[in-house]
Image: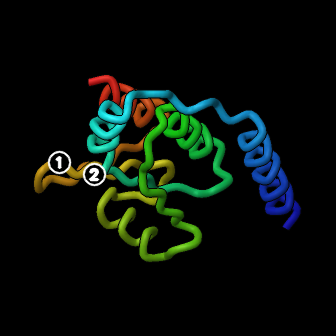
Amino acid sequence: MLLKLVRNGLGAVIVFVDRVSRPKAMQRTPDEQSRVQSLMDDLSLYQFHACPFCVKTRRAIHALGVDIELRDIKKDLRHREDLQQGGGQVKVPCLRIEDSNEVRWMYESDDIIDFLNQRANA
């Protein structure tokens, strides 16, 4: 019980600090923004709202100035089931990548951020 209170309190602090210190989004020309966003349309991020590694990943997404569908696996059990069945484990953050007819699952915030940066700068 005490551990849950501490974890929830710490999560609230992390989310608050993220909101007040969020980096500015990258500025692009409208055509370039449209091109980069189209490269992100086949992605979705499975996450918890207050998870520190999920916050880190969302901050990177915000800094890139793109929209990626966020799927909170605590709020929607269907997303949790999709993550477990598709990715093989219930671990966040996890990026679901659809390329053609293939679906890949990427865990680890640093790997996800590197992937997003490479895709945005391709």
Type of amino acid under label 1: Asp
Q: Residue furthest left?
A: 101
Relative to the observer, which residue lies in front, 51 or 65? 65
Type of amino acid under label 2: Asp
Q: Residue at horizontal 57%, vertical 46%?
A: 54
Numbered marks: total: 2
Could you say where residue 19 lies in the image, as x and y percent from the top left? 73, 44
Which class describes the residues within 10 Å of circle 1: few (<14), some (14-19), or many (20+)? few
**Element type at marker 2?**
loop
Q: Residue at horizontal 50%, vertical 28%?
A: 26
Which class describes the residues within 10 Å of circle 2: few (<14), some (14-19), or many (20+)? some
Q: Are marks 1 and 2 in contact (CB under 8 Å)?
A: yes
Residue annotated with mark 1: 99
Relative to the observer, which residue lies in front, 54 or 5? 54
Could you say where residue 106 lies in the image, as x and y percent from the top left? 35, 44
Distance from the alpha carbon under mark 1 to that under mark 2: 7 Å
Could you say where residue 5 lies in the image, as x and y percent from the top left? 85, 61
**Element type at marker 1?**
strand
